[in-house]
Amino acid sequence: MSETIAGEAVAGAVEERFRQLYGAGPQGVWAAPGRVNLIGEHTDYNDGCVMPFALPHTAVAAVSRRDDGVLRLHSADVAAPVVEVTLDSLTPGTDKNWTAYPAGVVWALREAGHAVTGADIHLASTVPAGAGLSSSAALEVVVALALDDLYELGLRGWQLARLCQRAENVYVGAPVGIMDQTASACCESGHALFLDTRDLSQRQIPFDLAAEGMRLLVVDTRVKHSHSEGEYGKRRVGCEQGAALLGVDALRDIPYADLDAALERLGDEEEVRRLVRHVVTEDARVDRVVALLESGDTRAIGPVLTAGHASLRDDFRVSCPELDLVVDTAVTAGALGARMTGGGFGGSAIVLAEEADVDALTKAVEEAFATAGFTTPRVFEAVPSAGARRVA
Ligand code: ADP
Ligand code: MG
C-alpha cells in the first residue's frame, strides 16, 4: 500500500535526463518534499500556528547555473519541450503554466537583490499535483535551495520559504500562506514542525507514530482543488474583515477565552462570524495537539483532529463530499481521528489509526467511495520525512 518515493531514489534518473536535455551534467541535484498538515488549517494567513510534517514524496531538481541571463526549464512530468526565457522578461502574473513556479522563484530572488544570472533546470516530482499535499511548494523550494547553493547566497530555510511564498503570491498569483514552503524547507525526519506564522519561530516536535503502534494514512480523494480560484481568496478576505471589525492585526490576536465576546461583537455578520470561529478554535486545537504530543498522550490528538474537520466543514466551509466521506467512514470504522488536510475543496484527508486497524479502515474508505460512485481514492501511509536537501 505505501508508496514512498524519496528524492535520493530518483536523483540518478533526473541527472541523466538533465544531461540529455542540456548536453552536460548538472552542477548538483536537490530534493524538497511535499507535506501533510497535522493540525492548524487556514491559520497561516491569520498569523496563527500550524503543524505540518514532510512526506517522503519529493520534487527533485538537477540544476546548473548560467551567467548569460537565460533560464531554461523542463519537467519530466509535463509533456512539453524545454522552455527558455530571459530573466529580464520575467513579469508577475503573465505565466499561467507550471513554469511560473520555478520562474517565480528566480524572479523573487532577483527582486530581493540576489544576483542570480540564469540557470538550467530539469525536475521531476513524486508529490501528486493538486492533491493538497503541496506539490507547488516542493517545486518552489527545490529550485530556491538549488539556486541558494549554486549562487552561495547563504539563505536560511525560513528565508527561502519567504521568497517562495512571495513567488507564489505575486508571480503565480495564488494568495497562499507561509506554511507549505516552510514545511518543505524546514521539516525534519521523525518530527512535526510547530510553526508560529507570525514570527516564523519553529520547534521540531518528535512525531513517531510507528513506535507507539499507530499509523497516519493519507487519503487522496483525487478531487483536484485550485488555490488560485476564488474561494480560497474569499476566505482570506473574510478573515481580514473579521480582524478589522474586531480591531486586531490578525485573528491570531483573539484569545480562545475571548471568542464568545468577539462573536457577539460581530453581530449579524454571519459569514465573518463563522470564519472567525474556525480560526480561533483552530488555533486552540493546535495548542492542544502540541500539549498532548509533548506529554506523550498521542492517541488523544485523534478527537482534536476530527473536531478540526467539523470546523472546516461547517464554519469555514472548505470541505467537499469526498473529504467528508473519508472522515465519517474512518471515524465510524474505528479511526482515532480524521480530518481534511491542506486548503480544501478536494485534495487529501488524513486518518490517524491503530496499526492493527489500517487494512480494515482502508477497505472501509474504498468501499464507501465505490458505493457513493466516487473515483477510487489513493491511500498511503505518511511517515514524517526530511525537509529540503542536496542529494547529489
Ligand atoms: P498542490 O500544491 O496542492 O499540489 P497547487 O495547485 O498549489 O496544488 O500546485 C499544483 C501545480 O504545481 C500544478 O498545476 C503544476 O503547475 C505545478 N506542479 C506540481 N508538480 C509539478 C511537476 N512535477 N512538474 C511541473 N509542474 C508541477
Ligand atoms: Mg500548492
Image (cartoon, rainbow, N blue to C red):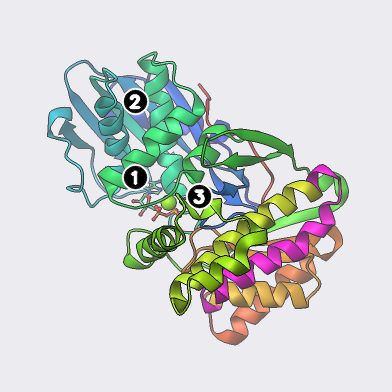
Rendered location of residue 205, percent (x, y) = 72, 38
Rendered location of residue 238, percent (x, y) = 40, 65
Q: Residue at x 48, y 52 (%)?
A: 46
Q: Is residue 2 left or right of residue 377?
A: right
What segment carries the magenta color?
A: 293-321
Give the residue number, with chain letter if any, for mark 3. 44
Q: Residue at x 78, y 66 (%)?
A: 359
Specify which label sits upstream in the sequence, 1 or 2: 2
Nearest the viewer among 244 and 185 is 244
Q: Is residue 252 left or right of residue 69?
A: right
Q: Is mark 1 within 8 Å of ligand 2?
A: yes
Q: Amino acid at mark 3?
A: Asp
Q: Is residue 303 left or right of residue 76?
A: right
Q: Helix or strand or loop: what does disc 1 sit on?
A: helix
Give the residue number, with chain letter if any, for mark 2. 19
Query: From the image, which quarter does the N terminus lie in?
Result: bottom right
Residue 39 against residue 365 in the figure, above or below = above
Q: Is mark 3 within 8 Å of ligand 2?
A: no
Q: Amino acid at mark 2?
A: Arg
Residue 317 sits inside the magenta stretch: yes
Give the residue number, with chain letter if any, for mark 1. 168
Nearest the viewer among 363 and 336 is 336
